[in-house]
Image: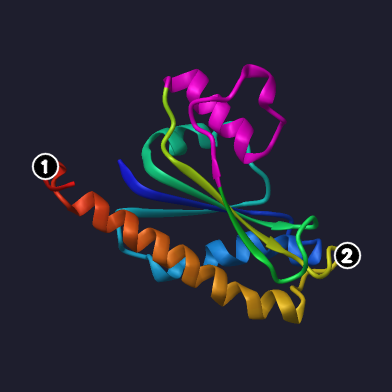
Amino acid sequence: MTDVLIVGYGNPLRGDDGMGRETARRLALQYAGDRRVKVLSRHQLTPELADDIAAAGYVIFVDASEDLPPGLIARESLPTETLSRNSTHQGNPVSLVRLCLDLYGKCPPTSLIAVGGASFEVSQTLSPLANRTIPQVISLISEIVERKLLEESVPQQQR
């Protein structure tokens, strides 16, 4: 079982939409060799990810957002037990949580880290703002990961 699964996703051909993937790339280097943390970089979210999600103790999705002001970082906890079957949309974290619940009867606690992008035009490079924001995102995710790993290392009787 993976203690923490990080899934960064987005289209690297649409400018800042590639922030989730670039964040995942950097986090994969940071956590290389730590078997408690698994980092995946994906162009899009697919149903096959439900297996990895079900095998994790905690899941963090990382994505760029056109709905947030550029550079703003938002963290949202996703519901893992109260979703109705009608609450899914193809290819988003909520649909994967629902699929995980349908297939395995459970889903680990899950968060979405969304980052406001400055440019989603056709481009293979991130905006200067996105490049300045990614270290902040990595710091936030690292804090979450370290907290979750610490929780996992504390024996159940001491919690």
- Spot occupied by residue 99 in the image (x, y as percentages of width and height): 56, 25
Mark 2, Cα crowd under 10 Å, few <14 / some 14-19 / many 20+, is few
Quadrant (top left, top right, bottom left, bottom right) of the N terminus: top left
- Spot occupied by residue 77 in the image (x, y as percentages of width and height): 53, 45
Which kind of residue does numbered mark 1 sit on? Gln
Residue beneath disc 1: 157
Residue 26 shows up from this direction? no
In the picture, measured across the screen, residue 159 lies left or right of residue 74, that is left
Q: Residue furthest right?
A: 121
Q: Is residue 141 above or below residue 2?
A: below
- Residue at 33% x, 46% y is 2
Query: In this view of the protein, which residue sits in the foreground, 139 or 125?
Result: 139
- Cα gap from disc 2 to disc 1, whole angstroms: 52 Å
Q: Which mark is residue 121?
A: 2
Give the residues in magenta.
77-105
Q: Which mark is residue 141?
A: none
- Spot occupied by residue 83 in the image (x, y as percentages of width and height): 58, 25
- Residue at 71% x, 71% y is 71
Q: Quadrant of residue 18?
A: bottom right
